[in-house]
Image (cartoon, grey):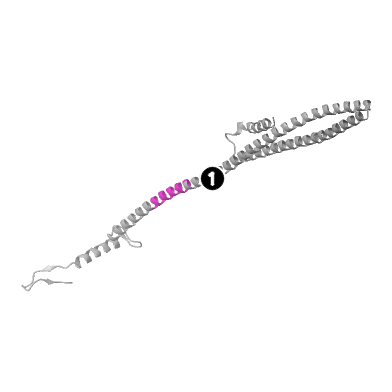
Amino acid sequence: MAEGGFWTRTKRLFRSHTAKDAGADPEEVRERLDEAYRTQSRLLAQVRRGVADVATSRKRVEIQLASLRREIESAGAEAKAAGDRGDDATARLALERQVALEKAATELDDRRSQLRSEEQQLIGSAAGIERQIEDFRVRKDTLAARYSAAQARTEIQGATAGIGAAAGDVGRVMADAERHTRELEATADAVDELMNEGILTRPGESQDEALLRRFDEALGSIDSEPRAVEGDGHGPHQISQ
């Protein structure tokens, strides 16, 4: 009976929260499991107190039974003594009291047997509940450890995914910066080439000055090249300005 009530109350505790299980907060679930464990422990304590109460009642009955048996022996001895001395009236009264005491002792012995049976049942129920509570505690602690590990894995995976996404963004930014740099370098090279050719003027230079600089550079490149001329039959001669 105690065991059935125990599990009925435990199931009722979980059933009261069933509707919220789907979206329950993990910390709330953990607290609910802890509360269920505390509830089971309190119920186990009640069962143990019940065992102690039944055991106390049994011991009291045994004390009363021992006292009755002493009275029975005394009444029997008195009846025998009265009969030996020929006191039939006293002997009859002692025998009547002995019979009444024996009847009370029989009823008390039956009560002691019932209490002992109840005590053994409660002890078995308490042992079974204790094993179930211990199993629940182990499963609860295991679940808490699994949840912590899963939470850590989720956080690590999230961080890894975030780093990967950030790395992808950085890679795209770097590629864009490199492409833009190449474009700027190409533009600068083109400007330098146009400025060298006199098509574009240099800073502080007029268009006429740019044309004159271009002409001087072209003339200088021609003058710097070696030229072969026919001589007087003694071989080629290099002429310079």
- The spot of residue 210 in percent (x, y) is 29, 61
On screen, residue 118 versus residue 92, left or right, reads left
Q: Image point 37% across, 54% down: which residue?
A: 181
Estimate the x, y position of residue 193 in percent, counting from the top left: 29, 58
Left or right of 188 in this view: 134: right
Where in the figure is residue 81, as x and y percent of width and height?
90, 31
Instruction: Judge left or right: residue 112 versus residue 12.
Output: right
Vertical relation: 222 (above or below) 37:
below
Q: Is residue 183 visible?
A: yes
Quarter occupied by the N terminus: top right
Find residue 10 and report its horizontal and vertical position in percent.
65, 33
Q: Residues within 10 Å of mark 1 (few under 14, many from 20)?
A: few
Question: Is residue 213 shown in magenta?
Answer: no
Q: How many marks?
A: 1
Q: Residue furthest left?
A: 233
Find out whether residue 175 is within the magenta segment: yes
- The quadrant the C terminus occupies is bottom left
Part of the protein shown in magenta: 161-177
Q: Depth check: 103 or 147 in front? A: 103
Residue 99, by quadrant, is: top right
Q: Main secondary structure of the magenta part?
A: helix
Q: Secondary structure at mark 1?
A: helix
Q: Nearer the viewer, residue 218 or 225?
A: 225
Mark 1 = which residue?
A: 149
Residue 114 or residue 23, whichever sits in front: 114
Residue 236's image quarter? bottom left
Q: Is residue 82 above or below residue 212?
A: above
Q: Is residue 180 above or below residue 74?
A: below
Amino acid at pointer 1: Ala
**Is any part of residue 26 visible from this angle?**
no
